Amino acid sequence: MHSPDEARKRRLDALASGDPTTLAERYAALEPSAPAATPIRGPEIGMVMLRGRAGGGGAVFNLGEATVTRATVKLATGEVGHAIVLGRHLQKAGIVAHLDALAQLPDWVQVIETGFVTPALAEQDAARIRQAEETEATRVDFFTMVRGED
Amino acid sequence: MYVAVKGGEAAISNAHRLMADRRRGDRNVPALSVEQIVNQLSLGVDRVMAEGSLYDPELAAMAVRQARGDLIEAIFLLRAYRTTLPRFSNACPINTSRMRIERRVSATFKDIPGGQLLGPTFDYTHRLIDPSMAGDEAVTPPVKRERPTEESCPRVTDLLDGQGLIEADVPSNDKPGDLTREAIAYPVGREVRLQALTRGDEGFLLALGYSTQRGYGRTHPFVGEIRIGMVDVEVDVPELGFAVCIGAIRVTECQMVSQFKGSADKPPRFTRGYGLVFGQSERKAMAMSLVDRAMRADEFNEQRLAPAQDEEFVLEHCDNVQATGFVEHLKLPHYVDFQAELELLRTLRREAEMASADTPMNEPAE
């Protein structure tokens, strides 16, 4: 269904957008049994320059920076995991990088999927639907008042 | 004679301690938490992020707390913080047409595809202080309504664009100038102006936008569309070889549609100004789009007569950290400078006195 890159992107996208506290709780349950990771880089806090486009679709311009945290870890068996997440979340970046590395192991990919990615996506979906439904209730339903005989 | 003056360390240290005390206020009143500020003063936090030019709600809330609610001071703190961090990379441009909409209105098209979604707005309130704000009454949860199946929300300018009635975006991936890294040399590109405007002072831009409505660089604008919501941020990760989503940010976008221009080879069409700001900040996005349009005077062969059309004037004065720095430095000791001025004045007066002593006084007229 997904190419390896697509599957990895889908996983990293889901994990990066997840709530740090929930992620840490789930990770705490898994970590003791998982192959350990050693840090290669970070976790470290920095910034990325966010960009927009003039008019929404025109030339690129610099919108301002955002804080990010990135981490790279390596398993004893050589798999390297990367993470970059919005905000200052050292622990979260470390967890996401470890999960990214673990998901490259055939024995672990399903564990990461069912234990982390699926619930994270479900939570994000629920939040988005709730928000969209609250917004929807503020939609203006125009109606026309008919005056006179004609 | 130059006399170096030292001293004041104890006074400064005690003043800072006093300020910390006053910031905390009455100890019988619970302290504000960062969470409370992020949640309940969110529009103030948004302004600090936008003008501090750093998206991080918790940091902005800490700055608001530290600055005792002085937002320009908080913006200054955030700007100072951002200088301490390395910039890892540039994100991919955000795609506002894929925004998860929280509010979206058009003043030009009643039946816009995607609909008019008012969202959490102050509009249509009576602007009367609500007595319940004195206490902590329970707030009823918002009403929900099922969303129509995946209705798209095209940008209003794209709708008109299909008919050639409005100037189109000219997509380009040219590397934009960055006023935080390179000195500004005028004239500058529109992308540098947009960067300056999005981090510019809301009050200053509001006044300039207002001035264009009042005739100082008339643009005759309509709000084509305002949208507020969350957009995903994607960053290329070289180690992976593809871009990943690192999270989402809230932004406000304003498409201001202005009066038409044509040329020999192009029929007349509406022109546009653009506003894009961190957070929920409609007034700022609208002001930005007005000033953006005004500063495009040269593109449309308009005479540049008004302040809002003068890019050097706007860009050099819209940054409130620069402005407050230069204005507020006046209160710091200028003893030596002033002494020099005083000395000069005394000399001038002495010379004037001597000159009048030399020439005999004229007889008063009768």
Image: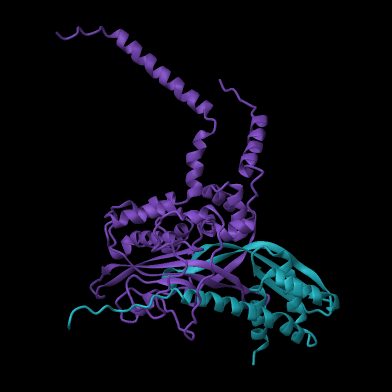
Chain colours: A cyan, B purple
Q: Is residue B149 above or below residue B61?
A: below
Location of residue B224 in the rendering, given as x and y in whole percent from the top left corner: 35, 70
The answer to which of A39 and B356 lies nearer the viewer is A39
Image quarter (top left, top right, bottom left or bottom right) of the C terminus of chain B: top left
> Residue B65 vs residue B98: left or right?
right
The answer to which of B233 and B187 lies nearer the viewer is B233
Q: Residue A70 occupies which quadrant of the picture? A: bottom right
Q: Residue at x 68, y 83 (%)?
A: A118
The answer to which of B248 and A79 lies nearer the viewer is B248
- Residue B80 visible here: no
Q: Residue B109 occupies which quadrant of the picture? A: bottom left
Q: Residue at x 39, y 81 (%)?
A: B113
Q: Is residue A145 above or below residue B315?
A: below
Image quarter (top left, top right, bottom left or bottom right) of the N terminus of chain B: top right
Q: Residue at x 55, y 66 (%)?
A: A50
Q: Residue A16 occupies which quadrant of the picture? A: bottom right
Location of residue B162 in the rendering, given as x and y in whole percent from the top left corner: 34, 81
Q: Is residue B159 above or below residue B307?
A: below
State the residue lying farthest toward the left.
B366
> Residue B303 vs residue B74: left or right?
left
Location of residue A104 in the rendering, given as x and y in whole percent from the top left corner: 75, 83
